[in-house]
Amino acid sequence: MVPFVALAAMVGLVQSVGTTTAAWTNDARTVASSSGIMSGEEFQARGPGDKCLDIESRQNANNTSIRLYSCNSTPAQKWWLTTTGRIEAFREDPGDNGVTGIRCMRVSGNTNGATVYLMTCPAGTNVSADFRWRFVANADGTVQIRNQQGTNPATGDRCLSWQTPPPGTDPTPLTMRTCGATGYGSSWRIEQYGTPPFP
């Protein structure tokens, strides 16, 4: 595992559950050091068992679904979180499977049951809420992956979740749910792949 790094570039994107500040606190750095990630670093997000945040069929066409799938360290499971809150895919090989261009994770709405899928990334730094994400640290070092749709993050954000207990077969669907909702899991372990050669 890559050692934990300073997260000054991530202000507003990573916070500790139960705190009011959007930046990492020292306590949050301690409890979530195994999940530390800085803008520009490639990461893999593990859910239950040996299942990872995955792009269906390793395609980067618009509207491709995002789900849980057995971890396999392919480009379909490699992600980047930017300083604007976008979660990007296919930065390392934007021409993968013959479809050119980086894609971003997008949510279909701010309701329970909303789905997540790939879409062409918005231009510039003014990122709309349906493309804007942040990590929120749990006390056990895992994180919630929250979409920033709500005007009040404490009550308005929803978490990228799976139904529990998850099925043992691939794939497992993902939907947005109220964080902590009964019958759903939303604790992800973020693992670094290192820093790619991008700005």
Image: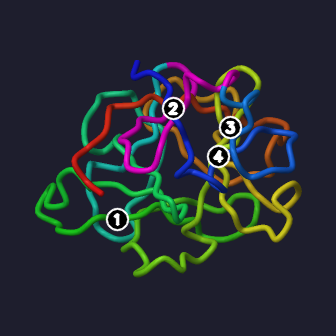
Identified by mark 1, the residue type is: Arg
Q: How far apart are marks 1 and 4 (CA)?
A: 21 Å
Q: Distance between the residues labelled 3 and 2?
A: 12 Å
The tag on residue 190 is 2
Instruction: State the residue at coordinates (63%, 72%).
Output: 129
If you read the primary sequence from the N terminus, does the residue marked by circle 3 or circle 4 appear first? 4
Q: What element carries label 3?
A: loop
Cβ atoms at labels 1 and 2 below 8 Å apart: no
If you read the primary sequence from the N terminus, does the residue marked by circle 1 or circle 4 appear first? 4
* Residue on which the image places disc 1: 103
- Give the extent of the magenta segment: 30-49
Q: What element carries label 1?
A: strand
Q: What element carries label 4?
A: strand
Closer to us: 77 or 165: 77
The tag on residue 14 is 4
Identified by mark 2, the residue type is: Ile
Q: How far apart are marks 3 and 4 (CA)?
A: 15 Å
If you read the primary sequence from the N terminus, does the residue marked by circle 1 or circle 3 appear first? 1
Looking at the image, is 162 positioned above or below residue 84?
Answer: above
Query: Around disc 4, counting alpha carbons within 10 Å, would you say few (fewer than 14), some (14 to 19), or many (20 or more)?
Result: many
Q: What element carries label 2?
A: strand
Indicate whether residue 151 is drawn in magenta: no
